[in-house]
Amino acid sequence: MTVLDEVPAEPAAEANDARGRVAELHAIREQVRRGPSDRATEAQKAKGKLTARERIDLLIDEGSFNEVEPLRRHRATGFGLEAKKPYTDGVITGWGTVHGRTVFVYAHDFRIFGGALGEAHATKIHKIMDMAISAGAPLVSLNDGAGARIQEGVSALAGYGGIFQRNTRASGVIPQISVMLGPCAGGAAYSPALTDFVFMVRETSQMFITGPDVVQAVTGEKISQNGLGGADVHSEVSGVSHFAYDDEQTCIEEVRYLLSMLPQNNRENPPAAPTSDPADRRGDVLLDLVPADGNRSYDMHKVIEELVDDADYLEIHERWATNIIVALARLDGQVVGIIANQPASLAGVLDIEASEKAARFVQMCDAFNIPLVTLLDVPGFLPGVDQEHGGIIRHGAKLLYAYCNATVPRISLILRKAYGGAYIVMDSQSIGADLTYAWPTNEIAVMGAEGAANVIFRKQIAEADDPDAMRIAMVKEYKSELMHPYYAAERGLVDDVIDPAETREVLIRSLAMLRTKHADLPSRKHGNPPQ
C-alpha cells in the first residue's frame, strides 16, 4: 500500500489527538512559567530577590511580553548535566513594550543552574541581541547569574565572547541597559561595562573580576562581596554603576523612566512629551540662587530645576565625581543632555573622574541625537601631583575629544567664572558650540584675577611701597580691562549676554532653531580618542 492508499484517520480520533497535544503544550508552558520548582523559588525569595519573570513583568507593559525559545534545553553531557535539562536553560528572552515602544530583554533565572551561562543559554542571548539590533530597539539585560557554567568548559566562555562582540556592535546603535540584580563575577562583568547604563540594587547585586576569596588569597586583604563590588562601591568609588537603588521594584521603575527619555535607536530622535510648563516662564529666582561673588558656593541642582520642565530631571552618576553634574531632562517637552559644573563640590573644578564622567555622557548623547546644554562655572582643572601622575592631561582630553566630535546641537551658558583650559574644554565656542550665552556675572579669563595680577604685575608689586595695596589695585585693573562681563561678547566669543531670568526661554528658542542641524563629518573608519 502506498502513502496515497493509506486510510485516513477518523475525524474524531484526529480531534482527540490534537486536543491532547494542545493540552500537553499548555502543561509544558505552565511548567516553564512556574520554573524549576517551588523550592528553588522559595530560595530566591529568601534572598530578597524577585524571580526572572516577576522582573520582566515589572519592566514590560502588562500583557505585551513575547517570549523567544522558552522550550530551549542544553545539549551538554557529563558531570550530571544529561540528567538535568530544564526548559529555558536558565535565561528568559523576548520582547515587549515599555510605554508603548518595543524593547528587547533577557533575564537570567538564578533558579536554574544559578543563572550560569552555557552554550544554549548564550545562543538564546545572542539571538535576542541580534533581533534588537535588526529591529532598532533598546536592549535591557536583567542580570542575576553565577558566571560561566563550569561543566560546559570553553563552550561557555565562547558564549561570553559572542555577547561582548554584539555589545560592541550595538554600541551607539541602540540603547543598551544592564540591570544588576544578583552576582556578576569574572568575565561576565565585561558585558555590563560595555553597555550604556548600569543599574544596581544594594545588598543583592555585586560586580567584580575576582571575588573576595581570591583577593584574600593573593593580596591578604579581607573584604566582603558588597565591600568589594557592591552597589555603593560602584556608584560612588569606581563609577562602574550609573544608578543604585534600595530595592528591585524602584530600580526597574527607574529603568522604565530612563527608556522614556531615550530614542529607539541612533536614527531616531528622543520622544517628545507634552508639558504644561510655559516655554517663556521667567526664572527670577536665579538671581538669588547664584551669588555674583565667584568665591561663594551654591548648588547647581537648584539652577537645573529652575530651567527644565517641571523641575524634573534624571541625574546620571549622581554619587560619583560629584563636582560635575550630568543629567537627562526636557525643555519644552524635548529631551536634552545637561552637563554642569557643581560649585558645591570641589568648587566645580574638573579632575580625572569628572572629565571621564562628562566625556562618556557627551558621547552617549551624541550617539542618540540628544542635544547638549552645558552650564559653566569652572575655576579650572584640579592641581596636584596625584592628578598629574594619574593622567589628568589624558583624561581631560577625553572630554575635549567628546565635545569636538559631537554633532548634535550644542549650547553653552557661562553663569560665572570660566577659567583657563577648563573653559575651553567645557564646550566653548572655539571647539564648536553652536551658541554660547553668558550671564552678566560671567568672568572668562586665562585664570582668576588674583593669580593673573601676580604674574603680570609681579615686578611692580614687589617694588611698591605698599605691595598689598598695589596688588589690590592691579587685580582691579585686570578685572576691569580683561574680565568684565562683555569682554568675550565684544570679541565674538559669546553670542549674547542674557538676563538670567530669561535663560529658559532663550535655551528653548535656540534648541528649536538647531533641531534641523546637520553636520558633515570627514570620511574615516573611526577616530582614535585618548584613553
Image (cartoon, grey):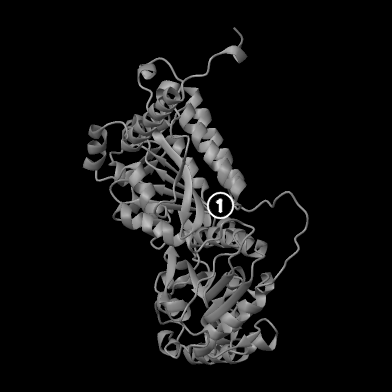
Indicate the position of residue 114 as horizontal and vertical percent values.
34, 32
Hey, which quadrant is residue 78 in on the image?
A: top left
Q: How many marks?
A: 1
Pick the quarter of the image with the N terminus: top right
Q: Residue furthest right?
A: 523
Q: Position of residue 321 (x, y in %)?
A: 43, 62
Q: Amino acid at mark 1?
A: Ala
Q: Give the answer, above or below, for where 347 lies relative to 164.
A: below
Which residue is more in the foreground, 206 or 45? 45
Residue 229: quadrant of the picture: top left
Question: Residue at 32% of width from left, 55% of height from top?
Answer: 249
241 or 430, nearer to the observer:
241
Residue 17, by quadrant, is top left
Q: Residues within 10 Å of mark 1 (few under 14, many from 20)?
A: many
Left or right placement of residue 45 versus residue 200 in this view: left
72 vs 478, left or right, is left
**Residue 287 in view of the camera:** yes
Residue 520 spot, x, y in % from top left: 76, 63
Residue found 43% across the figure and 76% down from its top? 300
Res 317 visible: no
Q: Residue at coordinates 38% horizontally, 19% vertically from top-left?
A: 81
Q: Is 67 rendered above or below residue 330? A: above
As drawn, the residue found furthest toward the top would be 1
Compared with 55, 87 (above or below) is: above
Q: Which residue is mark 1?
A: 137
* Depth check, front residue: 97 or 214: 97
Q: Secondary structure at mark 1?
A: loop
x, y percentage for residue 298? 40, 79
